Image (cartoon, helix red, strand yellow):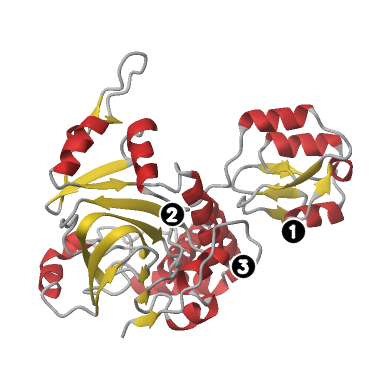
Amino acid sequence: MPHQADDGRPGTPGPAVGGRPALSRLVGDPDDFAASTWARGPLLRTKADPDGFDDLLTGDAVDELLGERGLRTPFLRVARAGSTLPTNAFTAPAGVGAGIADQVSDDKLTALFAGGSTIVLQALHRVWPPIIAFCQQLAADLGHPVQANAYVTPPQNQGFDDHYDVHDVFVLQVAGRKKWSIRAPVLPAPLRDQPWTDRRDDVRLAAEQEPVIETVLEPGDALYLPRGYLHSATALGGVTIHLTLGVHSWTRHAVAEELTGLALRRLAEDEEARGSLPLGTDLGADDIDAEVVAKLLRDVLDSLDPAEVAARMRARRRGTQRAAPVGPLAQHALAASLADGTVLRLRDHVDATLVDTTITSRVATVAVDDVTPDVVRRLLAVEPVTVADLGHDAARRMIEAGLVVRG
């Protein structure tokens, strides 16, 4: 059964100061959410934020993004009657001085929206500062990568038919009212290569069943859906805007990928595993030494150090999110004006760790053999340090690499 909570509590995005602020804003008590809801079932929170989500997105912000920011595909798609329109239906050349043929056309979008099409702003975690900050904090709170799309739907229209996503989602109602119908999965916890389009008949039949949640979301409401849950939404009354925050969960299957990949690399060092199959083999079941190979593989898997697998997972994680935005000109000016008392701090969301005498992060790898271990520890603990603490050469290296910013 779905978990429903109405004890909404407001919050605002901000730095990681403890208490999982972004997640708390959406789910209330993160510990209760982790124990009873995460990856298990839906959660509906009416008035999750009584003040609404206007600090993240508004109708004026949508117009600015569509009319003034020069967006290109794939940062936008448009849907009508459950189908996605071709990109040339809503893009046009950028005009003189820019050899770009696929910039968003506000003129075309105006006509399409008036005709009942839904506008989907994609990857807002890359282009809209309030959502960048919120998604980075939410990803830190969850431990899983987060993306953001916005769906802008004209009155009495449905953008997409019943479908499921291969990632968990948080739905944040920004403006207007939208009716949502949620149904049980046809494939619980689908992987990224198991989309709903591979199960169209099953999805169509499931869409005829009674929903587990049928509700109207209003501004400030939030809805959490684990991957696999079927859903569809219809705008009621006026224009509606909602944010969908997609959570690309790390899975046990991803751990299995790392385990088997590492095991195969180890097997490549084993002469028996590299051995040839018999001359004249027809690759029949009795002719491929499957039992021998399976034993070799099991032995290697049993010998793997989980810490090594975890380190490989963390290395993969660095490529799934971006560090907090940084200004190249501001960094240049900072590096050019260093003084002993200049205060620096680790850039937010760089996912930095110390390996021997090198800091490894998602933005750079920087040697710190000339920095005292205590200062490195303080830096990685997100404590402020001075240029005198680091030394001018090390401070400049870190600034130019984008690892640290002004404190």
The type of residue carrying mark 1 is Ala
Report the front residue among 149 and 200: 149
Taking the image as drawn, is residue 156 in sight?
Answer: yes
Mark with earlier residue (2, 1) = 2
User: Which residue appears at 53% of the width and 51% of the height?
Assistant: 133
Q: Local crowd at mark 3 within 10 Å, few (<14), some, or many (≥20)?
A: few
The type of residue carrying mark 3 is Ala
The type of residue carrying mark 2 is Asp
Q: Residue 77 location in percent, x, y? A: 25, 43
Single out the mark in the foreground, 2 or 1: 2
Q: Secondary structure at mark 2?
A: loop
Disc sitting over residue 307 in the figure: 3
Per the model, the C-alpha gap separating discs 1 and 3 is 22 Å
Contact (Cβ within 8 Å) of mark 2 with mark 1? no
Q: Which residue is mark 1?
A: 381
Q: Residue 30 location in percent, x, y? A: 53, 75
**What residue occupies the far bottom of the structure in this picture?**
1
On the rendered structure, is 143 left or right of 284? right
Taking the image as drawn, is residue 193 in sight?
Answer: no
Per the model, the C-alpha gap separating discs 3 and 2 is 43 Å
Report the front residue among 91 and 248: 91
User: Which residue appears at 37% of the width and 73% of the height?
Assistant: 46
On the rendered structure, is 236 left or right of 318? left
Contact (Cβ within 8 Å) of mark 1 with mark 3? no
